[in-house]
Image: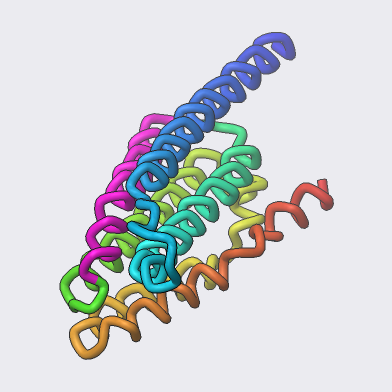
């Protein structure tokens, strides 16, 4: 019986490792596509460099977002002991929304003064945030309410606050796009430091 339980646990660990490895690969491709879309200044003057500054700033914001998802996704799956079909589909949903980031980044870098691109960028951020919350809940259901994942996540106030800010940014982009960009940057700053809930959980164990 102990041997069977050990085999099942190793099988679950391999499944989680496969999901993590696949997700790492997708996120690496997303970042690579964004980097390829960056353009060097047309000349050597500060004016030429300033013309490409909006694209660089949007790239930095998008890179930060994808990096934040990669770091927290890593901690989330490392804390999980079980993976099922619902978790895998939820994970694919997160990757789907993140895969739209390069398109939105390129659009905003060219049309940053307009409301629609700013709102579309926020919609993708909101979709990724909702998908990540669904992934978290799927992992909690799969691993149990007393699992390490559930204890680390807690009430996830920071996650829900991010969704509210994204929604507010999308709506406020109709007034001034820069308001939306400021809110997007604020969420990134809020998550920039890796989520210490998992670190505390690992220390406790």
Quadrant showing the N terminus: top right
Q: Is residue 204 left or right of residue 151?
A: right
User: Which residue is depicted at the point 19% across and 78% down?
Assistant: 115
User: Which residue is depicted at the point 24% across and 64% down?
Assistant: 110
User: Which residue is depicted at the point 57% across and 26% down?
Assistant: 17
Q: Is residue 128 left or right of residue 157?
A: left
Quadrant showing the C terminus: top right
Please tell me which residue lies in front, 123 or 39.
Answer: 39
Q: Is residue 88 left or right of residue 69?
A: left
- The secondary structure that dominates the magenta segment is helix
Q: How many marks?
A: 0
User: Which residue is depicted at the point 31% across and 58% down?
Assistant: 105
For residue 106: magenta? yes
Please tell me which residue lies in front, 186 or 110.
Answer: 110
For residue 77: magenta? no
Please tell me which residue lies in front, 194 or 31.
Answer: 31
Q: Is residue 163 visible?
A: no
């Amino acid at each position: 019986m102990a041997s069977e339980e050990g085999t099942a646990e190793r099988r679950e660990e391999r499944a989680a490792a496969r999901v993590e490895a696949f997700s790492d690969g997708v996120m690496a491709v997303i970042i690579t596509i964004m980097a390829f879309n960056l353009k060097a200044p047309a000349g050597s003057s500060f004016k030429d460099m300033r013309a490409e500054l909006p694209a660089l700033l949007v790239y930095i914001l998008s890179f930060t977002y994808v990096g934040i998802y990669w770091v927290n996704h890593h901690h989330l799956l490392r804390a999980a002991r079980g993976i099922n079909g619902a978790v895998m589909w939820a994970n694919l949903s997160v990757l789907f929304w993140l895969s739209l980031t390069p398109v939105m980044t390129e659009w905003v870098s060219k049309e940053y003064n307009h409301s629609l691109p700013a709102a579309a960028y926020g919609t993708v951020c909101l979709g990724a945030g909702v998908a990540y919350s669904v992934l978290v809940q799927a992992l909690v259901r799969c691993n149990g309410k007393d699992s390490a994942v559930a204890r680390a996540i807690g009430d996830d106030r920071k996650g829900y606050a991010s969704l509210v800010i994204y929604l507010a940014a999308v709506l406020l982009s109709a007034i001034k796009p820069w308001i939306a960009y400021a809110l997007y940057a604020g969420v990134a700053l809020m998550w920039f430091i890796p989520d210490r809930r998992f670190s505390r959980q690992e220390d406790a164990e």
